[in-house]
């Protein structure tokens, strides 16, 4: 990692930031001294406080991927899991290929991807490639819808995905070995070692993936007779590790996390082209230090992080060879207090200093973004709850118009988990560095785009009997994205971004889940559906026929369902996802048809003394559906994956 | 049982391909008109072929797909007709689709080309194909539609102009030369230095070669219009554009070889004997229009202009009379680009 460098030029900014922190955190310093003498707070309370920070804010929608799903997908990446288990549309170029999220009809750059609350989207592209995030390296995946994402950061107009890693504070050692192999030359391995006690925890995770991706597909795009072909130039190799260290000293929890990952991919051509010379290398190093201090009615958190990302792309044919390195230094401080029952007050100050060095730009680029966020929440413990959040961004010495979000939540029946939620938010996204500085095209005068989002959600959680539980949620939303940044041609040579468009996104999401359990038998069922209409509202071009037309690659209809049964040591699940047609041109004249993909998992978990062994068989695309997620990029047919998970507890 | 399996499997196969609207174009014959090669978006595979018919004053879209039941390919760039065949050069598919020029039914596909751009015919048996990303021009054997050899230019190539036994081949991307090839032995015999990035060229009535150099992708240099003497392989005249903002493209000439046309913030017109570049446009784009390519009917000097709109949806084919008056505007495919006139009625 030659990229480690000193940030001398940022020193003055750091001093400025530290000064601000010292003003906000002056009470913290005093309390920190007291804490040395106070050893009465129990360990578990610290963990609960941590959970409170990520609790669903009153009036907003947030979901957490359940642990069974996380386990089922432990050898895959975030892209594959969200494709089958969420309402987020994943635009994927195939197994291991670039995969970007579209949340509630928005673009990938309008979805935040966070790691323990820190934005890890590329500052150049403004988005994340979800195929580069192995599920095995994270503990929880939290999905924030619409305005709820402002609890984490600004810019997630569609929503946010937060990847959580966290300690368990259990005494002992856990060694977990997860190895799998599957069709098309896929091999993967995951190792986890957790050890420690109530005072100290160490978690080490390592991940390896090698995938030839040489699947057979029916080429039905080059005339009849259709011909079976083998996908070439599609190999993927990934490796990474995550080291976490947690220290629990009474009411103070400190943590250090290091996440390194690299990926080397060959980028396959479309079915209509022959260029097999493209290759992409991604590398990231993320270091995060965090300290949480809890006092009777307040908690304080201080986080420092360095996020580095490298992206090298080459195409031997066109002699295109781009090399980019981004480095972001983050300082984040938060104070949360609970002055009265059910009342949470939170103030958060963060500063991100980003540097990008690339042969695409004509110079090294720096950007500093400071964000001050204050929020008040009354939890909906009894009849109602409310959340009010205000956020102000200072972007390179310039204050932007403040963002806000407000949510109201009502309990419809006393003592029951029936809620009505309503929220409104203004959320803004600053331009990416490519928008601003791309050579000959970047527009340094761009303003941030912003959206007003309105949401109404009905949610219920009803225990029918001691054996049977059911949950349901129905949301409708409407967003108007203004000053949307869009690249448009100046002429045949030059495209440049401008704040030129206004997009409306309206839709609904509905989910129903049921769980039944008796003796050794459990059954769960989930059904979800989303309807999204997302279209430009205006255009300054008389010949533009895109006004009122669905945005490209945004499915209007999406549905997911899954059913899972366990009986003793046996388990099986079936997941089916329907992705509706996606238009591929702005005037909606061409489209890709819907597809339905069904995956199954069947396994047995054998508990032995201090150990357990879990054998499972995954069958993906069970019905061998021939489909394309992106036009002319074939997707694999039926495939198999065998996994062995060995766990040792000591 | 087998039938049942077919019934189940067949929809799974057929529903996988990209759907696009079929126009009402299966019911006409290719008489007089002009083909429009719609480039489509890079890697999106949505390039297509359109035809404007003088008989019906209508445009017919998506012809290759409709007639041959498959997409044309990724980024078709140009088309040329020779004898009974039409040759469509598909850049990012590395191929040339050879079709019957009267019916557009595919008769052959020449594959294995590296980023082909334009095809020019030496005679009935031989053609040259330029290449964006290789340093050689491919030699095509037209009798069996195969690649018979290469001419190593040591640089990329774009436009090919043939006169007598000479081929003049422009070195476009970041280049500033016109390479001269002897078409009898396929050997490079000379090179002529012109302005930066010779993008397009055409012969006039006197056999002089006019070369439009656009000054570079990022307008680093002044664009130039250069007149070459094809007998002596030397520069006769150079017109330098007044500002770097000018980025002229798509040089064409009328049927008499007397009047030049090109795009530079609109359509401009210039007599080959003119002393200066034209100060005014003949046709000025309206708000939101993106003029992309032009074509001049060699018989009546009608001016065809393609409007690519935002390069991401159906563009327009605009037909203007020779004096610049708009005659019609009709929707073409995505990024309507180069044109190929077909003005002789074929059987």
Image: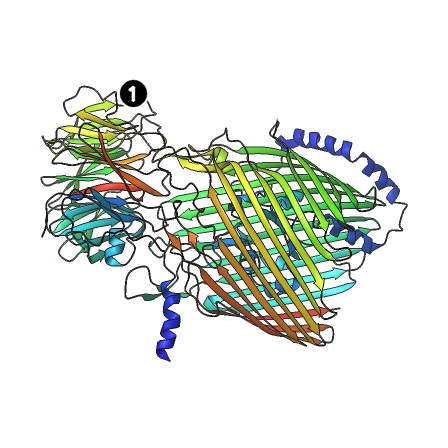
Of residues A321 and A645, which is closer to you in this image?
A645
Q: Is residue A162 left or right of residue B213?
A: right
Of the 4 image quadrants, the one containing the C terminus of chain A is: bottom right
Location of residue B294 (image quadrant): top left
Q: Position of residue B318 (x, y in %)?
A: 25, 36
Q: Is residue B234 left or right of residue A135?
A: left
Label 1: few (<14), some (14–19) or many (≥20) C-alpha neighbours in 10 Å? few
The residue labelled by disc 1 is B242
> Considering only vertical position in the picture, is B8 above or below A277?
below
> Considering only vertical position in the picture, is A649 above or below A285?
below
Q: Position of residue A108 (x, y in %)?
A: 52, 46
The chain that hosts pointer 1 is B
Q: Position of residue B347 (x, y in %)?
A: 9, 52
Location of residue B65 (image quadrant): bottom left
The residue furthest front is A413
Q: How is the image coloured?
A: rainbow
Of residues B216 and B10, which is closer to you in this image?
B10
Q: Position of residue A551 (x, y in %)?
A: 45, 46
Location of residue A398 (image quadrant): top right
> Considering only vertical position in the picture, is A518 above or below A545?
below
Q: Is residue B294 left or right of residue A35?
A: left
- Is residue A149 at least partly visible in the picture? yes
Residue at left offset 17%, top offset 56%: B145
Q: Give the total number of marks visible in the rendering.
A: 1
Residue at left offset 89%, top offset 51%: A40
- Is residue A1 at least partly visible in the picture? no
Residue at left offset 53%, top offset 39%: A481
Q: Secondary structure at mark 1?
A: loop
> Considering only vertical position in the picture, is A124 above or below B283?
below
The residue furthest bottom is B1
């Amino acid at each position: 990692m030659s990229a480690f460098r000193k940030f001398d030029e940022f020193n003055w900014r750091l001093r400025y930031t530290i000064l601000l922190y010292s003003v906000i955190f002056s009470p913290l310093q005093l309390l920190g001294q007291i804490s040395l003498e106070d050893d009465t707070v129990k360990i578990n309370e610290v963990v609960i406080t941590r959970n409170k920070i990520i609790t669903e804010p009153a009036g907003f929608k947030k979901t957490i991927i359940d642990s069974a799903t996380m386990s089922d997908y432990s050898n895959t990446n975030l892209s594959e899991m969200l494709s089958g288990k969420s309402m987020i549309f994943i635009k994927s170029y195939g197994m291991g290929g670039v995969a970007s999220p579209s949340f509630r009809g928005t673009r990938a750059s309008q979805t935040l991807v966070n790691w323990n609350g820190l934005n890890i989207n590329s500052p150049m592209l403004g988005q994340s490639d979800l195929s580069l995030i192995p599920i095995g390296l994270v503990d929880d995946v939290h999905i924030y819808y619409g305005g709820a994402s402002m609890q984490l950061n600004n810019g997630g107009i569609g929503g946010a995905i937060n990847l959580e890693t966290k300690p368990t504070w259990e005494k002992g050692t856990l060694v977990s070995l997860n190895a799998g192999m599957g069709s098309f030359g896929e091999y993967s391995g995951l190792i986890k070692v957790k050890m420690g006690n109530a005072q100290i925890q160490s978690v080490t995770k390592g991940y390896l993936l090698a995938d030839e991706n040489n699947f057979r597909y029916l080429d039905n795009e080059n005339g009849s007779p259709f011909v079976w072909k083998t996908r070439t130039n599609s190999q993927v190799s990934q490796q990474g590790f995550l080291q976490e260290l947690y220290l629990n000293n009474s009411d103070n929890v400190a943590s250090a996390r290091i996440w390194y990952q690299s990926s080397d991919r060959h980028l396959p051509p479309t079915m209509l082209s022959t260029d097999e010379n493209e290759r992409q290398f991604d590398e990231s190093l993320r270091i995060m230090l965090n300290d949480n201090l809890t006092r009777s009615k307040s908690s304080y958190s201080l986080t420092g992080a360095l996020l580095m990302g490298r992206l090298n792309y080459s195409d031997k044919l066109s002699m295109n060879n781009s090399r980019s390195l981004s480095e972001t230094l983050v300082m984040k401080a938060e104070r949360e207090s609970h002055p009265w029952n059910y009342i949470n007050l939170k103030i958060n100050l963060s500063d991100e200093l980003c540097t990008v060095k690339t042969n695409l730009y004509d110079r090294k680029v720096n950007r500093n973004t400071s964000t001050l966020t204050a929020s008040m929440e009354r939890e909906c413990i009894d009849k109602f709850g409310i959340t009010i959040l205000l956020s102000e961004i200072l972007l390179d010495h310039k204050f932007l118009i403040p963002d806000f979000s407000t949510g109201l939540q009502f309990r419809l029946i006393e003592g029951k988990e029936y809620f009505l939620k309503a929220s409104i938010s203004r959320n803004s996204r600053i331009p990416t560095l490519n928008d601003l500085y791309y050579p000959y095209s970047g527009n340094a005068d761009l303003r941030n785009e912003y959206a007003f989002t309105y949401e109404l959600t009905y949610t219920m959680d009803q225990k029918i009997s001691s054996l049977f539980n059911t949950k349901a949620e129905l949301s409708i939303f409407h967003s108007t994205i203004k000053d949307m940044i869009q690249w448009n041609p100046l002429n045949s040579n030059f495209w440049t971004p401008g704040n030129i468009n206004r997009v409306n996104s309206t839709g609904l999401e509905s989910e129903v889940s049921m769980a039944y359990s008796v003796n050794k038998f459990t059954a769960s069922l989930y059904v979800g559906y989303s309807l999204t209409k997302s279209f430009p509202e205006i255009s300054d071009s008389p010949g533009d026929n895109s006004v009122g037309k669905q945005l490209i690659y945004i499915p209007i209809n999406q549905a997911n369902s899954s059913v899972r049964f366990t009986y003793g040591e046996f388990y099986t699940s079936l997941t089916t996802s329907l992705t509706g047609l996606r238009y591929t041109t702005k005037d909606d004249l061409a489209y890709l048809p819907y597809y339905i993909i069904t995956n199954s998992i069947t396994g047995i978990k054998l508990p032995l003394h201090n150990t357990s062994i879990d054998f499972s068989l995954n069958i993906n695309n069970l019905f061998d559906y021939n489909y394309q997620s992106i036009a002319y990029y074939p997707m694999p047919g039926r495939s198999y994956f065998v996994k062995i998970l060995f766990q040792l507890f000591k | 049982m087998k039938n049942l399996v077919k019934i189940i499997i067949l929809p799974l196969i057929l529903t996988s391909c990209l759907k696009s609207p079929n126009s009402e174009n299966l019911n006409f014959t290719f008489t007089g008109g002009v083909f429009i090669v719609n480039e489509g978006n890079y890697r999106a595979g949505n390039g297509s072929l359109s035809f404007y018919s003088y008989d019906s004053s209508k445009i017919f879209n998506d012809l290759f797909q409709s007639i041959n039941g498959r997409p044309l390919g990724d980024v078709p760039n140009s088309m040329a007709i020779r004898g009974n065949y039409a040759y469509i050069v598909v850049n990012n598919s590395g191929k040339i689709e050879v079709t019957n020029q009267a019916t557009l039914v595919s008769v052959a596909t020449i594959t294995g080309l590296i980023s082909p751009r334009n095809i020019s015919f030496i005679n009935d048996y031989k053609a040259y194909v330029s290449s964006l990303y290789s340093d050689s021009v491919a030699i095509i054997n037209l009798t069996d539609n195969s690649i018979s050899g290469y001419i190593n230019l040591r640089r990329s190539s774009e436009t090919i102009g043939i006169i007598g036994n000479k081929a003049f081949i422009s070195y476009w991307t970041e280049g500033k030369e016109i390479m001269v090839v002897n078409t009898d032995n396929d050997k490079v015999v000379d090179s002529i230095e012109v302005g930066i990035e010779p993008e397009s060229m055409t012969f006039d009535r006197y056999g002089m070669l006019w070369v439009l150099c656009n000054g570079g992708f990022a307008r680093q240099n002044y664009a130039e219009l250069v007149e070459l003497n094809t007998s002596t392989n030397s520069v006769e005249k150079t017109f330098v554009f007044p500002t770097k903002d000018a980025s002229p493209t798509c040089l064409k000439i009328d049927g008499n070889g007397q009047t030049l046309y090109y795009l530079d913030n609109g359509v401009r017109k210039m007599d080959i004997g003119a002393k200066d570049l034209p100060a005014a446009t003949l046709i000025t784009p309206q708000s939101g229009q993106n003029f992309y390519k032009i074509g001049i009917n060699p018989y009546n000097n009608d001016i065809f202009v393609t409007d690519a709109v935002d390069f991401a949806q159906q563009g327009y084919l605009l037909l203007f009379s020779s004096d610049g008056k708009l005659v019609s505007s009709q929707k073409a495919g995505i990024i309507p680009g180069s044109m190929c006139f077909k003005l002789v009625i074929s059987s």
